[in-house]
Image (spheres, rainbow, N blue to C red):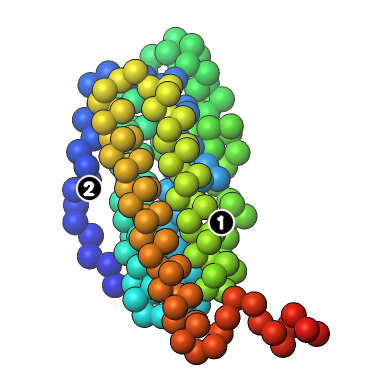
């Protein structure tokens, strides 16, 4: 069960609308390495996780990623408020606007809508945790790229915060992977399975 606190994890207060910047930031809602995919990945991986502490880790980080999606959506909403027709066309947001007006639709910056095909749930402890480590690094790189494109301190402060959280998640998943390997080794469930490998 989730308890929802009706405030953002980090305040989002964008003074200056900038639909061109919103067009790239939207990738962190529905892009292949965005927050929606991350939250769905972790919240679904937890069902097949055999270790309670790691199931809890997946639940905690998956829930936090939903909060991050809210923050990115708030940035996009504030960057696209009260756009004139000229601003919409000049920013290149016209094709998006035709389909979604100023709604926050989960899509990549390239225009591809979010798909569950971008998330990995294998049901194997080692495969899933390694996927999670990679996912956090890919999200960090996407935030790095956004920081290179943003000159608005109201935006970059929030993006830096989100980037830092990706690094913390990476560290937690690294600890989780080490715990999982230790637990598996205690039961002689080694990464290499002799019965398969000899076969």
Task: Give x and y (percent) for residue 152.
Answer: 30, 20
**Contact (Cβ within 8 Å) of mark 1 with mark 2:** no
Label 2: element kind: loop
Query: Residue, x 52% and y 52% (percent of image)?
Result: 134
Instruction: Point out the residue furthest to the right here.
Output: 199
* Among the two numbered marks 1 and 2 on one chain, the one whose residue lies closer to the N terminus: 2
* Residue under pointer 1: 119
Quadrant hosting residue 16: top left
Judge by depth and name the residue closer to the eye, 120 or 23: 120
Query: Residue, x 44% and y 81% (percent of image)?
Result: 183
Judge by depth and name the residue closer to the eye, 182 or 105: 182
Estimate how packed mark 1 is, as few (under 14), some (14 to 19) or many (20 or more) residues with alpha carbons within 10 Å.
many
The quarter of the picture where the N terminus appears is bottom left
Judge by depth and name the residue closer to the eye, 189 or 30: 189
Q: Looking at the image, is 59 positioned above or below residue 18?
A: below
Q: Looking at the image, is 33 positioned above or below residue 109?
A: below
Task: Give x and y (percent) for residue 50.
Answer: 46, 82
Q: Looking at the image, is 142 positioned above or below residue 154?
A: below
> Could you tell me how far apart the alpha carbons at marks 1 and 2 are, in whole angstroms?
24 Å
Left or right of residue 25, residue 122 in this image: right
Task: Give x and y (percent) for residue 87.
Answer: 42, 13
Residue 199 seen in the current view:
yes
Left or right of residue 141, residue 169 in this image: left
Query: Residue, x 57% and y 67% (percent of image)?
Result: 127
The quarter of the picture where the C terminus appears is bottom right
- Check residue 3 in the rendering and tell me which mark sits there, or answer none: none
Query: Residue, x 54% and y 70% (percent of image)?
Result: 126
Label 1: element kind: loop
- Check residue 9 in the rendering and tell me which mark sits there, or answer none: 2
């Amino acid at each position: 069960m989730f308890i929802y606190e009706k405030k953002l994890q980090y305040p989002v207060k964008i003074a200056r609308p900038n639909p061109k910047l919103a067009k790239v930031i939207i990738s962190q809602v529905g892009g292949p390495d965005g927050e929606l995919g991350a939250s769905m990945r972790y919240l679904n991986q937890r069902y097949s996780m055999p270790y309670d502490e790691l199931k809890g880790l997946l639940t905690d980080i998956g829930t936090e990623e939903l909060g991050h999606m809210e923050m990115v959506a708030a940035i996009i909403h504030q960057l696209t408020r009260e756009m004139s027709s000229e601003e919409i066309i000049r920013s290149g947001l016209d094709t998006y606007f035709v389909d979604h007006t100023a709604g926050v639709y989960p899509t990549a910056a390239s225009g591809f809508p979010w798909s569950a095909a971008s998330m990995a749930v294998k049901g194997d402890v080692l495969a899933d945790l390694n996927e999670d480590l990679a996912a956090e690094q890919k999200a960090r790189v996407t935030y790095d790229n956004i920081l290179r494109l943003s000159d608005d301190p109201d935006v970059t402060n929030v993006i830096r915060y989100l980037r830092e959280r990706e690094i913390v998640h990476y560290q937690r998943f690294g600890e989780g992977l080490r715990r999982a390997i230790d637990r598996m080794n205690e039961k002689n469930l080694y990464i290499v399975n002799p019965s398969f490998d000899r076969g």
